Amino acid sequence: MIPRSPETASPFPRRPLFAHHLAVLLLAALAASSASAAEDGVVAFDQALRDLASDHAALCVVAHPDDVDFEVLALLRHRFGVRTIIACVVDHDREAAGLEEMLGVRPGGLQAAAAHVGAEVRTLGFPYPGFTRDEASAQETWDRAALVASLVRALREARPALVLSGPCEADAGEDGQHALLLSALTEAFDAAGDAAAHPGAGPAHAAAKLLLPCRPEEAEARPDTGKADLVRGGTYAEAGAAAGRRCLHPAIRPVADPAPGPRLRPYRAVRSRVPPGDLLAGLAIPRPEWLSAEEWGGRAAIAAELVRLALAPAGDRPEDPRLGRAAALAFGLAFETSVTPDPIVAGEPGRLRVLLRNGGFGAIRIEGLAVSPGDGVTVAALPPPPPRLGPGEVFAAEAAVAFAPLPEAVSAVRSVSLVLSFGPAEEGVLFRLARGHRVVEEPAVLASFRRPGLLFRPAVGRGTVFVEIENRGAEGLRAPLLLSLAGTDRLALSAPGDVEVPARSTAVLPVLLEGREGLSPGAYEVSCTAGPAVARATIRVFDAEVPAELNLAVVGGDDGPVGRALEAMGLRPAFLRDEDLLTGDLGPFDAIVLGPRSLFGRPVLRQAWPRLLRYVAEGGVLVTAACRPGEWSPELSPRPFPLDRERVTRPDAPLVFPDPGHRIVRFPNAIAPEDFAGFRLDRGAFFPVLTDADAFEVPILVGEPGGEPHPAVALTAHGQGVFVYTALSWPRHLDDLNPGCLRLLGNLVSYLWRR
């Protein structure tokens, strides 16, 4: 139950009727807290009131999603009403696979975590380079000048009072990306307030503070996230932990529940334009009586405060959208709008729907409803709402929406915004409530290759790829299928001459690839045109040998890099399902390959592991790609070994072949260390600690220049077969057409072939 203060007299005696009605409405809303939906409404109302108490924003700038201090963001947003924005340097959507593999970040996890603490999310769009040991190596991927410019733009667009970052300064040197970000952010903080610097990045903005996590003894600010959130329940620390669990895979990066009691988060001001002190010191965030401490003020005091804010003669407070949200919640006014369908097919109509519902106990005056369509959008006349909406009354209306034709066969984002003007029936005060919609308009015909990256081995001679034509329009499509290939005349493409796709249906068409003599390894761009739609893909031609008679199986999905590479080699690997692992016949397979992170992605593997080791003992080859230490157990190897936590982060770190005649580097492909040039990320990580070194063969070693080499590939005999563990990050570079990785895969699966 939310604590309530004694009712106070309104300081606006001329408007007692309004204050009375609002007090009744608030009393009803608070008294209805027994139902979960009403509790949600109370939470929303509380947040709206807190938003009114702060005009400030806080920008949390991080290198990776796992660097965010969600506890402090929950405190700032939910307790102080500060608008919170997370700016992540790495493009967390485009780099989701690497972030999941290396850091345990769930795909979409940052957005889910941010939503839990009420924060917005932006990305600076930089690639994820893997682990980097120092700032210089991080700059090989992140250009420092470009990073500073992006940070200046982010600061000027968000216009925050507080700028936060992480991790702790003392720990930043452990990862070059953190060190580079902190130095670049400090420079950007100063430059953002200088109108002469970066003139194309928007109007200058001087934030008040730049705060970094620090050691407790260095702290200038110690926000306590252990305080109770009496409206939502729990503490701000618990809200932050819940957000962390939405961001990170619990099996890889578990987030512990915070201990009860004070939880001081130490921060140090690297830059400050206000006096030193606590997190919000010097920022003049008001603490009105109706938001004193953790309690709501008296109902009449809240009513009077809303009226005072709405009638304030100075500034643009009546237009403040936060005031409209608070007033709508106070009155019990629901304002729901939608534009459907979304996405919408070009050339087809949409519908704008509006619903007003008075769930309170007093009449509401509706002054007007303005509709503002964006470029390329036309909205038919919407029936006007009634001038007065009584308690329990509902107004619903809809209008047709038309979208301009798309100039090209690409999607466009259209917008429609609405503003409702309303107020109490007996008062002259007006509030405004806005709604906005962004609708994606898509072409009526879409074309795509089933896979955007296609591997082709000339020795196979022929291959097939598939083009999907989706006709989402109301009319059938009949058009020629046109193919083009840039960069070589040694690869022929053929497909059906015409394509027919009925309305609201999809066709999948084969495209035959045939290599000719003289086809060189490399990447070639192919396009397919069907009517107005164009599909594009990259065909990567590589050279690697593999016995055509091999019978292989893969654990990790048919859309993974291992399966794609084996199929491009002319093989047809089986992709093992859970039931295959538990009860299927594994004996016919010459080799089974466990793709990267299989132990995490396929929990059934642990249950099936005795069967896999029996398969090896009976003459099979089991190839295991790198695991994380938390996923691996020493007894999974026939001769147990743990994994260390070492990384070889330089993409060009040297490889060593102790025995150049070893079968792994000779059959069926001769491999040299220079074949592995061109890695984008780490060379390898989490290497086996071979305590029984005599039981293992290590044909490939890798280490930082001048450092200790680590086993990149280790194998041991088990019965009649071989168990192989690979810490080299070869699967990640198969789609990049790395010749060493492709040839190594061919050699691994061929290891016992006719031996």
Image (cartoon, rainbow, N blue to C red):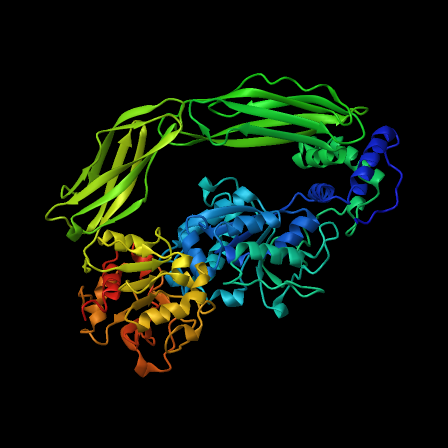
Residue 122: horizontal and vertical position, in percent? 51, 46
Decide if residue 701 is in sight here. no
Task: Name the one closer to the observer, 302 or 740.
Answer: 740
Residue at the (52%, 53%) spot, across then down: 61
Query: Does residue 612 appear left or right of residue 348 in this picture?
Result: left
Query: Does residue 536 appear left or right of residue 66 in this picture?
Result: left
Residue 506, by quadrant, is top left
Task: Name the one closer to the observer, 59 or 268.
Answer: 59
Query: Does residue 321 appear left or right of residue 683 in this picture?
Result: right
Vertical placement of residue 403 versus 674, above or below: above
For the image shown, how many numbered marks are present on the structure? 0
Residue at the (26%, 55%) spot, across then down: 566
Residue 588: horizontal and vertical position, in percent? 28, 63
Residue 245: horizontal and vertical position, in percent? 57, 57
Vertical placement of residue 434 versus 240, above or below: above
Residue reaching furthest to the left: 517
Query: Does residue 210 appear left or right of residue 726 in this picture?
Result: right
Vertical placement of residue 577 versus 665, above or below: above
Query: Where's the C terminus, which quadrant?
Result: bottom left
Task: Name the one closer to the observer, 445 or 608.
Answer: 608
Residue 478: horizontal and vertical position, in percent? 29, 24
Vertical placement of residue 25 versus 553, above or below: above
Residue at the (26%, 37%) spot, across then down: 527
Decide if residue 70 is in sight here. yes
Residue at the (75%, 27%) spot, across then down: 423
